[in-house]
Image: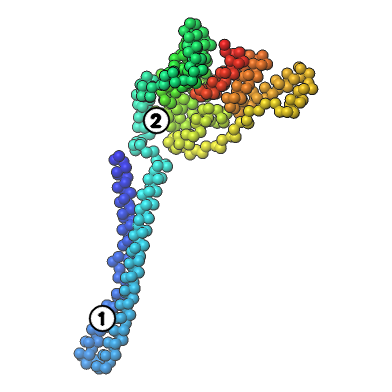
């Protein structure tokens, strides 16, 4: 508050000086007609003195008085006109002063909001880094962050079919605590319903069951669920899983996104910008983390003191498409093995496009279904695992691709 008081008073003082200088204008300077009046009055006195000394005659004195009086009247009229003009200029000066006040004060605060950092003290770089380090060390735990959020709605509020599925999965893993696939599916279903604490508790069992075979994606998924459970806050506990994720996969995009988010939350927008900008360049334009970064990265760049313009987003992937009528007509005249080869070509084309450009959950589900129909379960599993990574944090999308995986026989 003291900063705004000081800057406000400074701005008012600066404007006051400018306005006073503007309003004074020619203050202290008499108009030319006033000097003329003084001269003519002195001339009248001189005529009277000359007449008294008998230097001029009475008739000449009278003629001179008339001439000088005429000039006095003319000078007086000119002075009144100057005074009227000064009055107009005075009113214009007040208007200009008011406009100047608005421009200087309003423009200064607007410029500060654009280029400055409201809420930050006027601190040196080392002090700012020290404060960021302290914020990093003293940030709340996962448990504290979760308690600050509204309670999660009861499972009774969930639609019946979803409630039955989750309850069935819970019963299954209770009977078979070492069922890895059951815990994976339970974690996904809990996340899809927005029950992120239950989701990461199930994911924690997944990590335990996988042991040394747990991947960077598995740890990144765990950290994502914890972050969502804490209201998009990266806790110290979630950071541990992020570090494990990048230790196994240094380029893991989901882990890199959340580490950048953590840097931003602890007062290091400079580090967050570097991480997010590189991730945005290297990721498909419509990846979930790209969609999360794009609305905020220009603001992060300003806070980091970096000149940055967000590149224009690439067009959205083409809409979901099946075989055209021409494709169907062509397939009718083919031998069965040729038909299968054409279908495999379509599937490969869809797979290549999703890998290069990304796509909607329905397109990923279509690819998983198609691979299941072709009997390529191994590749279908690879695509399903990749889809879970791409749509991490998007429960609806995870549900779509999981349903496709069930239809493809990847999940019992």
Q: Which residue is mark 1?
A: 41
User: Toward which corner of the image does residue 30 lie, by quadrant?
Assistant: bottom left
Total numbered circles = 2
- Residue 240 seen: no
Identified at 51% across, 27% down, the residue is 289
Left or right: 23 as drawn, with respect to 317: left
Q: Is residue 352 left or right of residue 210?
A: right
Q: Where is residue 126 drawn, in percent x and y?
A: 36, 32
Q: How is the image coloured?
A: rainbow
For the point 43% across and 32% down, the residue is 269
Eyeballing the image, is 81 above or below 120? below
Residue 106 position within the rendered picture, expressed as x and y whole percent measured from the top left? 38, 48
Q: Which mark is residue 184?
A: none
In the picture provided, is 243 more to the left or to the right than 148?
right
* Image quarter (top left, top right, bottom left or bottom right) of the C terminus: top right
* Residue located beneath label 2 in the image: 267
How far is disc 2 from disc 1 in space, using C-alphas? 78 Å
Residue 321 placement (x, y as % from top left)? 66, 28
The quadrant holding residue 335 is top right
User: Is label 2 in a helix, a strand or a loop?
Assistant: loop
* Res. 167 visible in picture: yes
In the rendered structure, which disc, 2 or 1, sits on the residue that comes first in sequence?
1
Give SS at disc 1: helix
């Amino acid at each position: 508050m003291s900063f705004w008081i000081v800057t406000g008073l400074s701005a008012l003082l600066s404007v006051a000086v400018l306005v006073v200088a503007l309003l004074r204008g020619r203050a202290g300077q008499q108009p030319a007609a006033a000097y003329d009046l003084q001269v003519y009055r002195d001339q009248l006195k001189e005529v009277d003195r000359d007449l008294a000394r008998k230097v001029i005659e009475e008739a000449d004195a009278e003629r001179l008085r008339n001439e000088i009086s005429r000039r006095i009247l003319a000078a007086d009229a000119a002075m009144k006109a100057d005074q009227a003009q000064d009055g107009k200029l005075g009113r214009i000066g007040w208007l200009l002063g008011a406009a100047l006040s608005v421009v200087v004060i309003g423009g200064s605060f607007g410029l500060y909001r654009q280029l400055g950092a409201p809420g930050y003290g006027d601190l040196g770089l080392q002090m700012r880094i020290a404060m960021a380090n302290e914020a990093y060390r003293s940030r709340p735990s996962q448990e504290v962050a979760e308690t600050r959020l509204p309670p999660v709605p009861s499972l009774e509020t969930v639609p019946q079919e979803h409630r039955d599925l989750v309850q069935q999965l819970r019963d299954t893993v209770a009977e078979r605590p070492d069922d890895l696939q059951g815990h994976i599916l339970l974690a996904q279903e809990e996340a899809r319903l927005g029950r992120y604490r239950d989701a990461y508790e199930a994911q924690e069992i997944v990590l335990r069951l996988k042991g040394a075979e747990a991947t960077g994606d598995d740890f990144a998924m765990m950290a994502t669920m914890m972050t969502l459970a804490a209201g998009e806050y990266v806790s110290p506990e979630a950071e541990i899983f992020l570090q494990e994720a990048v230790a196994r996969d240094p380029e893991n995009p989901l882990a890199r996104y959340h580490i950048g988010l953590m840097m931003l939350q602890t007062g290091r927008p400079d580090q967050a910008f570097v991480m997010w900008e590189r991730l945005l360049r290297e990721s498909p334009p419509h990846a979930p983390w790209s969609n999360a970064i794009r609305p905020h990265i220009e603001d992060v760049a300003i806070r980091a003191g970096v000149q940055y313009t967000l590149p224009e987003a690439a067009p959205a992937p083409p809409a979901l498409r099946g075989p055209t009528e021409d494709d169907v007509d062509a397939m009718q005249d083919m031998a069965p093995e040729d038909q299968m080869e054409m279908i495999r070509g379509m599937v490969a084309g869809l797979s290549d496009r999703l890998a290069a450009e990304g796509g909607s959950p329905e397109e990923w589900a279509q690819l998983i279904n198609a691979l299941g129909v072709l009997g390529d379960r191994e590749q279908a599993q690879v695509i399903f695992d990749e889809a879970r990574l791409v749509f991490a944090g998007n429960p609806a999308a995870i549900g779509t691709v999981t349903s496709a995986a069930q239809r493809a026989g990847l999940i019992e």
